[in-house]
Image (spheres, helix red, strand yellow):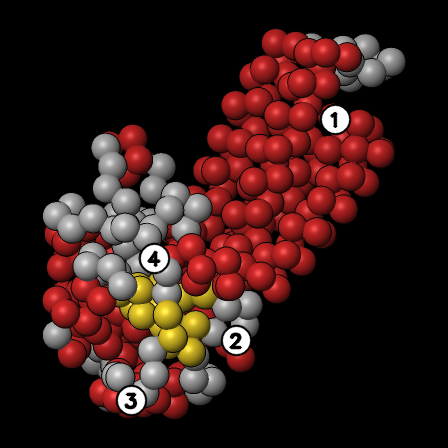
């Protein structure tokens, strides 16, 4: 409950930043434009984000005939979680990884890579899929799609504000009109603030999905073991389908990068996730 409250506050902060930029851009008219833009983007995220993600990742439907054991595992865990069976997709990628998408539990999708099925044992695959089921159960897939689209709209409005100020100057109210230097600073600071809020939302949802996923799987240890292997594999095996725009969906960041990319990663540190899961295992074991 506390994590959901925190997520709600962060989403409200993103929306407030979007509306503030709209107001700076054009007063009440700009505020209305920002509201309409947010509504359109969120509508698009709600209805089409899952289709876009699956298309970009190259995911293909995985039938029960092709993966009977995986379907049986999924059936048992969705029964435990009291949620509908999601669709199962396979990403033809050698890097072990997985993601979830879908606007609600009734339209949920779990996508696993070929590498995950080849390199993980049964309990590890179970832990990973349970984590993704937790994202669907908690509606994180929709939350993150909304956060990403609002952050993108903020970047767009900040750029519009900069060019408006640069070429047309401020409004008639000189006290409230941004100067070119301020607009230039806003071009960088507003998207940076949006990105930081988006990162905070994503990291909070990952920790919560680890916790709920452990309950769904029946133990935290399978996911903890999987995370160790996933972290090592990401640095050794490239992901040919992941993009910066979809990287936040995966259970671990599929894109290798330097320390700066790690600092601004949408995922919390893997070692901290493992520490929390192992502490959870020491405290209890689900029947």
Is disc 4 in contact with disc 1, using a CB cutoff of under 8 Å? no
Closest to the observer: 38 or 20?
38
Q: Is residue 241 left or right of residue 87?
A: left
- Residue at 80% x, 27% y: name it: 26
Q: Is residue 124 above or below residue 181?
A: below
Decide which of tag 4 and tag 1 comes sooner along the chain: 1
SS assignment at label 3:
loop
Question: Tag on residue 25?
Answer: 1
| Mark 4 to mark 1 CA distance (whole Å) | 35 Å
Is disc 3 in contact with disc 2, using a CB cutoff of under 8 Å? no
Decide which of tag 1 and tag 2 comes sooner along the chain: 1
Closest to the observer: 4 or 209?
209
SS assignment at label 1:
helix
| Mark 3 to mark 1 CA distance (whole Å) | 55 Å
Q: Position of residue 41 (x, y in %)?
A: 65, 50
Q: Residues within 10 Å of mark 3 (few under 14, many from 20)?
A: few
| Mark 4 to mark 2 CA distance (whole Å) | 18 Å
Which residue corresponds to mark 4?
250
Disc number lying in front (3 or 2): 3
Q: Is residue 4 visible?
A: no
Q: Position of residue 216 (x, y in %)?
A: 32, 79
Q: Quadrant of residue 114?
A: bottom left
Which residue corresponds to mark 2?
107
- Residue at 51% x, 63% y: name it: 51
Decide which of tag 3 and tag 2 comes sooner along the chain: 3
Q: Is residue 266 left or right of residue 236?
A: right
Q: Is residue 84 above or below residue 124?
A: below
Which residue corresponds to mark 3?
65
């Amino acid at each position: 409950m506390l994590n959901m409250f925190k997520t709600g506050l962060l989403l409200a902060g993103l929306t407030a930043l979007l509306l503030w930029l709209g107001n700076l851009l054009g007063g009440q008219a700009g505020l209305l434009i920002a509201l309409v833009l947010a509504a359109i983007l969120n509508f698009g995220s709600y209805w089409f984000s899952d289709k876009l993600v699956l298309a970009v990742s190259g995911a293909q439907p995985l039938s029960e005939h092709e993966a009977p054991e995986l379907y049986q595992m999924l059936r048992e865990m969705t029964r435990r979680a009291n949620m509908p069976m999601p669709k199962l997709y396979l990403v033809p990628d050698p890097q072990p990884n997985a993601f979830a998408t879908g606007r609600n539990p009734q339209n949920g999708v779990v996508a696993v890579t070929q590498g995950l099925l080849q390199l993980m044992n049964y309990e590890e695959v179970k832990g990973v899929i349970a984590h993704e089921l937790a994202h669907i159960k908690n509606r994180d897939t929709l939350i993150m799609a909304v956060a990403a689209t609002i952050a993108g709209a903020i970047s767009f409005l900040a750029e519009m504000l900069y060019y408006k100020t640069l070429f047309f100057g401020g409004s008639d109210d000189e006290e409230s009109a941004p100067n070119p230097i301020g607009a230039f600073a806003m071009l960088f600071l507003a998207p940076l603030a949006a990105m930081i809020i988006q990162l905070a939302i994503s990291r909070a949802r990952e920790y919560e999905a680890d916790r709920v996923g452990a309950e769904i799987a029946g133990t935290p240890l399978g996911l903890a073991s999987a995370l160790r292997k996933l972290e090592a594999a990401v640095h050794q095996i490239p992901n040919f389908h992941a993009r910066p725009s979809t990287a936040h969906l995966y259970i671990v960041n599929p894109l290798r990068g330097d320390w700066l990319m790690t600092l601004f990663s949408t995922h919390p540190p893997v070692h901290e996730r493992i520490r929390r899961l192992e502490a959870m295992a020491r405290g209890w074991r689900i029947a």
